[in-house]
Image (tube, rainbow, N blue to C red):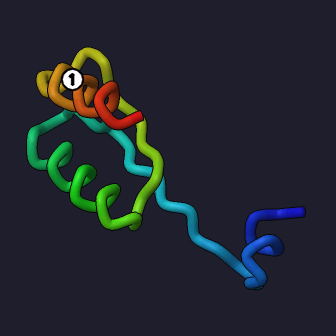
């Protein structure tokens, strides 16, 4: 059974936030969206300048 079927809808959009750690603003936006339940997943780019910030936040709230 697909996610759309489980939700009882014909189609569904799944938002995935890509390239976290590129900049502080992107990290902050992700935190805001996640706190309000608008997104639930994202991917972190390890060699980027704001990696430590997003990694520490992810460790604090898995």
State whether residue 18 is above or below residue 44. below
Q: Residue furthest bottom?
A: 9
Q: Which quarter of the image is occupied by the C terminus? A: top left
Name the residue nearer the viewer: 40 or 14. 40
Q: Residue at x 34, y 56 (%)?
A: 34
Q: Which quarter of the image is occupied by the N terminus? A: bottom right
Q: Residue at x 15, y 49 (%)?
A: 28
Within 10 angstroms of label 1, few (less than 14), some, or many (20 or more) residues?
some
Q: Could you tell me residue 20's position as x and y percent?
A: 28, 37
Q: Could you tell me residue 10's position as x and y percent?
A: 77, 84
Q: Could you tell me residue 31's position as x and y percent?
A: 24, 50
State whether residue 14 is above or below residue 23. below
Disc 1 target residue? 51
Q: Please state the total of marks drawn on the protein image.
A: 1
Give the left or right position of residue 11, taking residue 54 as reference: right
Name the residue nearer the viewer: 12 or 57. 57
Q: Residue furthest front?
A: 60
Q: Give the SS element for disc 1.
A: helix
State whether residue 16 is above or below residue 21. below
Q: Could you tell me residue 53's position as x and y percent?
A: 16, 28
Name the residue nearer the viewer: 7 or 47. 7
Q: Residue at x 48, y 60 (%)?
A: 15
Q: Residue at x 34, y 36 (%)?
A: 61
């Amino acid at each position: 059974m697909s996610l759309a079927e489980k939700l009882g809808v014909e189609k569904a959009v799944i938002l995935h936030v890509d390239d976290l750690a590129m900049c502080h603003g992107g990290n902050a936006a992700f935190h805001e969206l996640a706190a309000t339940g608008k997104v639930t997943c994202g991917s972190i780019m390890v060699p980027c300048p704001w990696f430590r910030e997003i990694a520490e936040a992810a460790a604090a709230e898995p």
